[in-house]
Amino acid sequence: MKRVKKLFSLMLALAMTAGVTACQPAAATSSAPAAPSSQAGEGSNASAAEGKVLNIWCWNDEFQTRFNAYYPDVREVAKDKSTTTLKNGTVVKWTINPNDNNNYQNKLDQALLAQGNAAADSKIDIFLVEADYALKYVDTDSTLDVKKDIGLTDSDLTDQYKYTQDIVTDKNGALKGVSWQATPGLFAYRRSIAKAVLGTDDPAKVQEQLSNWDKFDLVAAAAAGKGYKMLSGYDDSYRTFSNNVSAPWVTGTVVTVDPNIMKWVTQTKEYTQKNYNNKTVLWDDKWNADQGPSGKVFGFFYSTWGINFTLLGNSLKTPTKEGGKEEVGNGIYGDYAVCQGPQSYYWGGTWICAAKGTDNAATIQKVMKSLTCDKSIMKKITTDTQDYTNNKTAMEGLANSDYKSAFLGGQNHIKLFAEVAPKIDMSKTGPYDQGLNESMQKTFHDYFNGTIDLKTAKANFEKDVKEKYPELTEVKWPS
Amino acid sequence: MNRPKNEKTKLTAARAGCYLVLGILCFLCLFFFYMLLINASRNTFQIQQGFSFLPGKSFLTNLQNLLANGNIPVLSGIFNSFFVSALTAALATYFSALTAFGIYAYDFKLKKAAFAFILLIMMMPTQVSALGFVNEMDALGLKNSLIPLFLPSIASPIVFFFMKQYLDSSMPMEIIEAARIDGSNEFYTFNHIVLPVMKPALAVQAIFTFVSAWNNFFVPALLLDSADKKTLPILIAQLRSADFLKFDMGQVYMMITIAIIPVIAVYLFLSKYIVRGVALGSVKG
Amino acid sequence: MNSENSPRKRKSISYAKWGYLFIAPFFLAFLVFSLIPLCSTIYYSFFQYFRSGLKIIGPNFVGLKNYITLFQADLPKYLGNTLLIWVIGFIPQIFFSLLLAAWFTDLRLRLRAQGFFKTVIYMPNLIMASAFAMLFFALFSDNGPVNGSLISMGLIRQPFRFLASVAGTRGLVAFMNFLMWFGNTTILLMAAIMGVDPGLYEAAEIDGASSRQMFWKITLPLIRPILAYVLITSLIGGLQMFDVPQILTNGTGSPDRSVTTMIMYLNNHMYSKNYGMAGAVSTVLFILCSVLCFLVYVNMTRDNDSGEKRKRGARH
């Protein structure tokens, strides 16, 4: 025991020294957040006794950030962010489980299945879902009807993009979730490279040269001739194909691979062989680096959030955290522009669902109404963060204004988004999309790399599918 | 006169060879720590640009960003990890030694069966029974608790096996019999005579179990939900997938660095003790 | 069986309760935390039992169907992957560990800075396997420092895409296992060598034995129990290989599932909440590990056991 004590004091001393050295330059800001975590925990327990807890489950802090910043009833945010206290004393408890390897869904499933036996204050009240697996929850009775059970009215919801409601509408026509964002996709290209390859960087003229896949291929060849890559990675164009399929992935227990997905395979193999891409994989370091100052890639398929967050962040030479400014001159800020690209598509999106068994329906109604229906809040989110929000009137207002994005060289990208957002068709989505899209991308990387032939890649895809979804019995390939 | 000199040069050459091999191995081992530190001092953009041998200037920025990250409670993570790992190491070594001694020193009917049984289950990967384990803990109300992370280490077959081997090779029964003659109670004998003899083995296994508990991701990831209970590996995974919108590799490397420092400190602390313990050699054949 | 040397037995009988008492906590903890979950795992391997979305299918008894499916799938391939990668990593691991342990304990060599070396070689084991894999991924990526220096040295023109080649990926995993574990093994072997009676070496030295002779004739035979331990634990560790290939290949086991290990395969089934199939993989793995490890154990301890008995007999 003595040894353990000694060790413990050693550790403590170590941790404290680390803390102290860290805090010296900015003592006030950095010493504060970590320490009071235990107090906050106790605090939430104390108020739990009053029976007023709103449990929200999510996989990152995006919604938490929006909630704390824009929900009008927020009174206080705990220093460790684990809870948010509302004006009426209700405590919002955040449970954040990372998404990796299906972790979030697994934990959520477990909690939802145990929801019936859980104490009122530990029941999930709100959980968030992504487009790729929304249907898995929408088609169950774990999610409540936003209109009937929660009490949002048609007039509340009228300004939202229809597709954001279609995807979370169950078989019986009940709306099971709402979203604060719309995520139409565009093609973001480098102005300087477009000038070098096409002789122009004007979005309308560039769009003309990229308006279908044949033209896109021609530009890819031209770019390669000048030492540029058309795309960075294998998965870059995937969404443009997978969003334009003729049927959902699964009917009954049979997986049908759409011909359009195979077009992605053919195109990507060709691009790889002809060196039109840089052989990267979505989200890896090289892929991110290709979007920055050292990149030689013509453009990227990105939806709303990707352009103003990921692409902007990657384009800077000196990041904002280092004191860099978001301005022309820092890296390639200002060198990107967007156009619609060869095919319309969407990518991503988060929906708020109310869980069956909640005892906070009134609060949930207010949260949903404020954060997804309130025009002024939605407009404010867009002007503050440049996120594209789910409010037609507000977005069209911005589209027709003189709004300009300095990052996109003065282009009003909201206008382009507003044009493509109504075209989004989510009728072909299904509960298996996330798993099957991931399997497709992963198993075919080997084929693109030249390690295996097409037949093996197909066989590996089938194995992957059967491991992931034991209930699926067969995979059909287009002839 | 010639022969010793010849031998001396030979020895010097052998030594040089040893140092060369050791040097290369050490380089391989240390390079990763160097890389970790370098990357912890660079920002995401620089990390993406590829590796550099020179440190960046973002060490403090990364540290501040990490500590200011409300969703990643680093200090409570260090505390939880330390709490679980220290208890795991203590329980695993003590009870394994106790079990090994029980089987080594006494003759009883089920002795052989018990030993064979432990050997058989030793090969059982934890992952194999993980699903059942999680369900059981859920039923016992121990989910989201640190208890199921250290209590099962009372039954650590691999540590037991090492202890048993150690007893076989270095624990003469005569000492125990002598203690009995002196009227020592068996439990007292174990704590005051056997354990000191086993010190080197205890220290070695304490390190191993501490480190594996410290780095354990699989089981805690299945059990822990709330932020104040999470251990470091879970926080690292959370940081990595935190939010691709604000994906910050600098913070990730900083977090790994922080997660490694305490374990290195414990290791350095115990490794000295081992060398001393072994050198003292409380066992004489 | 029990009737041999009866006087000793009679003497020990009064202590038997202590034996039970001493091993009780172990078995109690094992029962609660391992045996019950293990039994439920094996039990469910005979059922169709999985989660489809939020619906639970089963449990429906299906007999050996899960096992048949398993062997029709690529289970032997994944076992082969696992063992191959383990062997590639274990050979250098045991070689360098024995070498270093012998050097460190060699009284004539008297290496300096031993503390430093011993400390350093164990260090890779301190990094979380996942963090280690992450670093390797960065190091050996197409534009990583390894490719960078190979190109600048003029050895290759195009970057070698380690993670797109079967040999490259398997080699990396094996290399990482070697780096992570050779320090650990060295410490174990050193502890064993230092436990050997120094009198033996002194006597041998007086007889004019060389370091090499002492190593082969004294050290190696006497540390055999620990060598058995190292081999067995390493084999178990090898069969449990998971974090490193999982993180290095992003969970895919690519290229072409050539680094998919048994546990990664198990994990794939757990990921899909397929209790039946996961149970079957676990059970196969369990049987397999038990057989392999018993073989190794029996083989390594056979003559040692008889030797020990003789020794003890002589003492009495």
Image: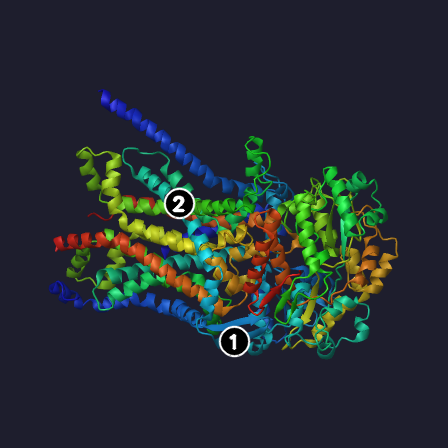
**Can you tell which quarter of the image residue A34 is in?**
bottom right
List the residue tagged with mark 2: C182
**Dot 1 surroundings within 10 Å: few (below 14), some, or many (20 or more)?**
few
Front one among B21 and B238: B21
Whether residue B92 appears in this view of the structure is yes
Q: Residue at position x 38%, y 60% from top?
A: C288
Is residue A338 found left or right of B38 in the rendered image? Answer: right
Q: What residue type is labelled 1?
A: Gly
Mark 2–mark 1 Cα distance, whole angstroms, equals: 46 Å
Q: What residue type is labelled 2?
A: Phe
For the C terminus of chain A, the quadrant is bottom right
Callout 2–callout 1 Cβ contact below 8 Å: no
Q: Position of residue B269 (x, y in %)?
A: 40, 47
* Chain to which the residue tagged by mark 1 belongs: C
Residue placed furthest toward the front: A479
Q: Residue at position x 45%, y 47% from top?
A: C174
SS for callout 1: strand
List the residue tagged with mark 1: C58
Q: Where is residue A68 in the image (x, y as percent from the top left)?
A: 70, 62
**Can you tell which quarter of the image residue A380 is in?**
bottom right
**Can you tell which quarter of the image residue A176 is in?**
bottom right
